[in-house]
Image (cartoon, rainbow, N blue to C red):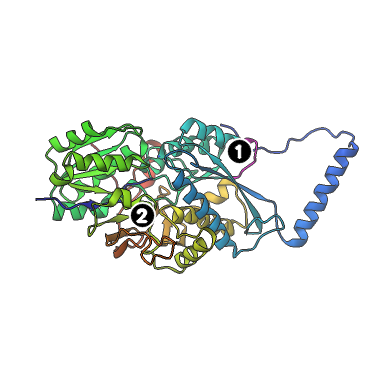
Amino acid sequence: MKKVFLAISSLLVITSFLLTACVQAAEPVEPAAEEAVMEESAEEMMESETGTGEVLKIGQLSMLSGVMALYGQQQVRGFMLGLEYASGGEMDAEGRYIIAGRPIEVITKDTEGDAEKGVALALELIEKDGVEILQGPVSSTVAAALTTVALENKIVLMVDPAASTFITGAYFNPYVFRTSRTNYDDTLVIAKYLVENVGPTFAHIGIDNAFGQGSGDALKYSVEKFGGELIADIYAPFDTTDFTPYIQQAMDSGADNLFLTWSGTGYVTLFQQLSDLGALEEMTVGTGYGDNASFVAVYGAALGQVGLNVYHYTAADTEINDWLTARHLEEYNEPPDLFTAGGMASALALAKALEITGGDASSEALIAALEGLTFEGPKGTYYIRPEDHVCEQPMNILRLVNLDPDLDDDGINEYQFFETVAVTEYDALGVPCTLEGEYASRCGDLPTVPAE
């Protein structure tokens, strides 16, 4: 008998200081320099008269080329729309949104999903461009590398959409925050359903990187919490095109359920080969309700099934999501997608923190404002835990009822694929604290992962 095909969200989803003015001996002012000083004084006077302060530069690390470029586009769009919402649309003469009295300039760099390049770009943003905050990236591997940049430069890094638990676990430091969910958000709720309704044993195929390994750790914790067992934990390179040996290993394990942690265009190939090898007949295969654009190609076999989702605009019943949806349709002629809400949430969290600090973007001020911050975003209420900077947030359980992206045939894809089964409360999942080493004691009374 054919097993149920269940979808669970496992998409992506993985040393220098700020420039300061030096004190120098007084020298005669050359005419050109004198003009520059006069222009600067005039600019300062104008800022005073208009009530705006110094421009605040935010360095955004994204992925605008390569296999996850779509996610980077969603991140960038969501972040800018978040600034627009938080500012009430107020802009300075240069068209920059004003938050806490400061015009915000966002400088976006394409990491191409490469950790080494991501670090180099982050340092360039800090040293050359003078950014005061870092935001992003898409890749969890890049995000893990950026945590060191944040620590060594004492600059706040607000992570979204990268999902690896390691970012606020093994690689945590006090300068790293997130509005993205963690791997544990992807596994806890659905693991209970699978153990109770399908069977207790699990195999896992994941990307061999921080995102995939973090998801494997989270899956093990989640299924064991509900009496299950992870009996085969399998990893493949991100550029894999032939998944046959990995799928066969999972099937040979005899597991009831196969959990997938993948992202990018490889998903289509993976699903095709799962079908070709008969895995969809032998096991309950769980994966993610992901982005709208690739949905039909990936999920054609899942009609009628229930699964987990990070964000879908049809599931979030909030005023902010209504605004985001309407504004996104107006600007881009399509509804917001999987990680648009995450980009917006990052902007809203930073904006609220800056309002608290009166526009002070120093790490000391921002850390104090962000720790324990509760704010409203497109999915509902978000809460940044002071202990480990994990962002608790709602997650969706959805039923797939349609595969036609343009149901009304008006030429605009509405992507109304789902009916909503449930939206969890932001604090319902009990995401464990995974801090290690010198930071482990910060976990306090939060749930933790048992030691091996």
Question: What type is the residue that disc 1 sits on?
Answer: Ile
Question: Would you call the spot at circle 1 few (<14 residues within 10 Å), some (14-19), or many (20 or more)?
Answer: many
Query: Would residue 369 be visible to someone looking at this image?
Result: no
Q: In the rendering, at what x and y percent does residue 209 appear?
A: 35, 34
Question: Is residue 420 visible in this depiction of the protein?
Answer: yes
Between 267 and 204, the residue placed more toward the observer is 267
Q: Earlier in the sequence, mark 2 or mark 1?
A: 1
Give the dominant element type of the magenta stretch: helix, strand or loop. loop
Q: Nearer the viewer, residue 224 or 81?
A: 81
Residue 327 picture location, percent across and down: 52, 64
Q: Residue 30: percent from the left, percent from the top? A: 89, 36
Under mark 2, the amino acid is: Val
* Closer to us: 87 or 240: 240
**What residue do we see at 64% from left, 41% from top?**
130
Camera-near label (2 vs 1) is 2
Q: Tell whether position 20 is magenta.
A: no
Looking at the rendering, the stretch of residues picked out in magenta corresponds to 126-132
Residue at horizontal 27 percent and vertical 62 percent from the top? 401
Q: Secondary structure beneath disc 2?
A: loop
Q: Which residue is mark 2?
A: 310
Q: Is residue 228 above or below residue 241?
A: below
| Residue 130 part of the magenta segment | yes
**Residue, disc 1:** 126
Lateral position of residue 1 relative to residue 11, left or right: left
At horizontal 27% and vertical 40% (from top left) the residue drawn is 270
